[in-house]
Image (cartoon, grey):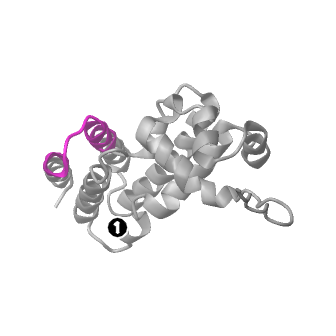
Amino acid sequence: MTTESPRPRGRPRRFDPEAALPIAQRLFHERGYDAVSVADLTAALGINPPSFYAAFGSKAALYARTLCRYGAIDGLPLSEILRPGRPVPEALASLLEEAARRYAGGSAAAGCLVLEGMRCNDAEAQRAARSLTTASLERIRGFIAADHPEQAEALTDYVATVMTGLSALAREGHGPERLLSSARLAAQAIAAALPG
């Protein structure tokens, strides 16, 4: 004789959208925004599509929330690195080296989730990634401009270019040694470009 396990009493447990964010972040980071479907997300989160849309509104809206989480938890600590009074060459060298370490840190989730998101095919998701990138670049530009206003624009563009390249190298499977080597070379170029 078999006994069926009793059904739990009361309402079914509710889905927690906040608990879903790290799972969605991992999927988006490993595969890229375009390669993750709503079916992939609902399977990973253990919910059905209506619950997904009720909780997040859309895939792009979930992506925007994961980008905010990534920036707050896994992103580069700009406030710490770009602290007032720190020499610009030293701070930018630290920024690029930290980016190299973080981008190469996870084999499946390599690169920068935000920078990679700027290349996706969904305009709403792309806007979310661009917004975070723009805010970060403005902080970098402001930090540089405090000491070197004439070079702030060009150096910020250069830092953005190097960081995008580091992310791409990490996505291609290059390890931390190679990324750190590139970051250090870029830091030397920055130091040489600044007066004094």
On-image quarter of the N terminus = bottom right
Pinpoint residue 150: horizontal percent, then vertical percent. Answer: 34, 50
Residue 44 seen anywhere in this rendered image of the structure: yes
| Foreground of the two, 168 or 43 | 43
Q: Which residue is mark 1?
A: 81
- Magenta residues, as a range? 162-182
Most distant residue in the top direction: 121
| Foreground of the two, 68 or 108 | 108
Residue in the picture at 23% in, 58% down = 93
Pinpoint residue 38: horizontal percent, then vertical percent. Answer: 63, 34
On-image quarter of the C terminus = bottom left
Judge from the rendering whether residue 163 lies leftward or rightward of residue 66; answer left or right: left
Magenta portion: prevailing SS class: helix
Judge from the rendering whether residue 169 lies leftward or rightward of residue 53; answer left or right: left
Q: Secondary structure at mark 1?
A: helix
Judge from the rendering whether residue 135 lies leftward or rightward of residue 179; answer left or right: right
Residue in the picture at 73% in, 37% down = 49
Q: Quadrant of residue 94?
A: bottom left
Pinpoint residue 143: horizontal percent, then vertical percent. Answer: 39, 61
Pinpoint residue 40: horizontal percent, then vertical percent. Answer: 57, 36
Residue 190 belongs to the span the image colors magenta: no
Residue 64 seen anywhere in this rendered image of the structure: no
Most distant residue in the bottom direction: 85
Q: Amino acid at mark 1?
A: Ile
Q: How many marks?
A: 1
Most distant residue in the front direction: 1
Residue in the picture at 79% in, 64% down = 8
Mark 1 residue crowding within 10 angstroms, few (<14) / some (14–19) / many (20+): some
